[in-house]
């Protein structure tokens, strides 16, 4: 994951920000408890959104308690009293990171490749644990990597085709949050749109770097202004994601989730494209 699914913090009310930050810190703590200290490196706002969505689809209140941050003991943070609620999101983050490491070993060069080789044994054990606990996540993510590699090996020129693996893995992962068929369809659509958003924005951010290195980037096949094309596609993803979000039976924290969908996504892609 790339951290592109994040809130517009300036527009959050104080209590909303405390919930958002509390889930972020709680996911960090759960990753460390379940998969070891270094697994906290998997933490991103993408998985914070997944964790918050998971919690918000459930009945009952969200109870927090105050505690110290592991990385900054002088700092107090709010944590969920029951971080076991975040097991699904923690496992998804761990599995995704492991396959990202494998991908870096395959595609990267120099220090990045060496770093991936060195950390692979460390995260291999955490990956096995997460994959055993959540076999469906493992199935979808491993399939995603195979599909993405095939897209790149075939030098796919279709933007839709290139974005499909990322969109599909997000769609399938989100759909695992419920057993209700109607809600599952809405979650699948939400995940699909967010996955396409992530892929397109990441491709745009890497465009210049990929041109220099000769790496695969589907946006090379676009005629005209790349930024304008990507912006229009991202607005389409956001609009479709919003429609799916409105179909969900959100029990709590809807305003925080809505901030991400209606404000955060647009703010993030504009900031990233302006770099």
Image (cartoon, rainbow, N blue to C red):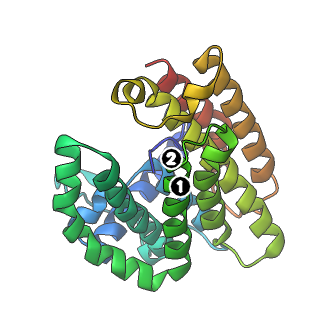
Q: What residue did someone put label 2 on?
A: 152
Judging from the image, what secondary structure is the residue with disc 2 in?
A: helix
Where, by quadrant of the figure, is residue 132 drawn?
bottom left
**Where does the image place residue 79, in percent across and percent down from the top left?**
38, 63
Whether residue 219 is situated above or below residue 23 in the rendered picture: above
Where, by quadrant of the figure, is residue 198 drawn?
top right
Q: How many marks?
A: 2
Tag 2 and tag 1, C-beta contact below 8 Å:
yes
Closest to the observer: 208 or 249?
A: 208
Residue depicted at x 49% and y 74%? 138
Q: On the rendered image, what quadrant is the C terminus found in? A: top left
Residue depicted at x 51% and y 82%? 135
Is 162 situated left or right of 100 in this image? right
**Where does the image place residue 109, in percent across and percent down from the top left?**
24, 43
Closest to the observer: 115 or 62?
A: 115
Residue depicted at x 53% and y 55%? 150
Disc on res. 150: 1
**Where does the image place residue 194, in percent across and percent down from the top left?**
63, 47
Residue depicted at x 24% and y 72%? 36
Specify the farthest residue to the bottom: 132
Is 49 situated left or right of 28 in this image? right
Whether residue 228 is situated above or below residue 205 in the rendered picture: above
Other residues around mark 1 within 10 Å, as few (<14) / some (14–19) / many (≥20): some
User: Marks 2/1: CA distance?
Assistant: 5 Å
Is 35 situated left or right of 176 in this image? left
Closest to the observer: 145 or 245?
A: 145
């Amino acid at each position: 994951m790339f951290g592109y699914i994040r809130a517009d913090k300036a527009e959050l009310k104080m209590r909303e920000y405390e919930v958002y930050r509390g889930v972020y810190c709680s996911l960090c703590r759960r990753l460390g408890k379940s998969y070891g200290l270094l697994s906290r490196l998997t933490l991103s706002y993408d998985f914070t959104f997944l964790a918050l969505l998971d919690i918000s689809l459930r009945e009952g209140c969200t109870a927090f308690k105050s505690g110290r941050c592991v990385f900054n003991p002088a700092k107090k943070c709010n944590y969920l009293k029951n971080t076991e609620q975040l097991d699904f999101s923690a496992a998804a983050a761990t599995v995704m990171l492991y396959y990202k490491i494998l991908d870096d070993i395959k595609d990267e060069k120099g220090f990045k490749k060496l770093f991936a080789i060195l950390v692979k044994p460390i995260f291999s054990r955490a990956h096995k644990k997460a994959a055993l606990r959540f076999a469906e996540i493992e199935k979808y993510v491993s399939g995603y990597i195979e599909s993405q590699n095939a897209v790149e090996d075939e030098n796919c020129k279709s933007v839709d085709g290139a974005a499909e693996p990322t969109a599909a893995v997000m769609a399938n992962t989100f759909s695992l949050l419920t057993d209700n068929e109607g809600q599952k369809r809405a979650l699948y659509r939400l995940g699909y749109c967010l996955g396409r958003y992530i892929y397109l924005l990441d491709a745009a951010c890497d465009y210049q770097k990929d041109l220099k290195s000769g790496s695969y980037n589907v946006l090379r096949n676009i005629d005209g202004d790349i930024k304008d094309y990507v912006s229009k596609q991202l607005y389409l993803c956001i609009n479709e994601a919003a429609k799916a979000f409105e179909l969900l039976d959100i029990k709590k924290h809807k305003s925080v989730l809505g901030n991400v969908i209606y404000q955060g996504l647009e703010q993030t892609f504009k900031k990233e494209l302006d770099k």
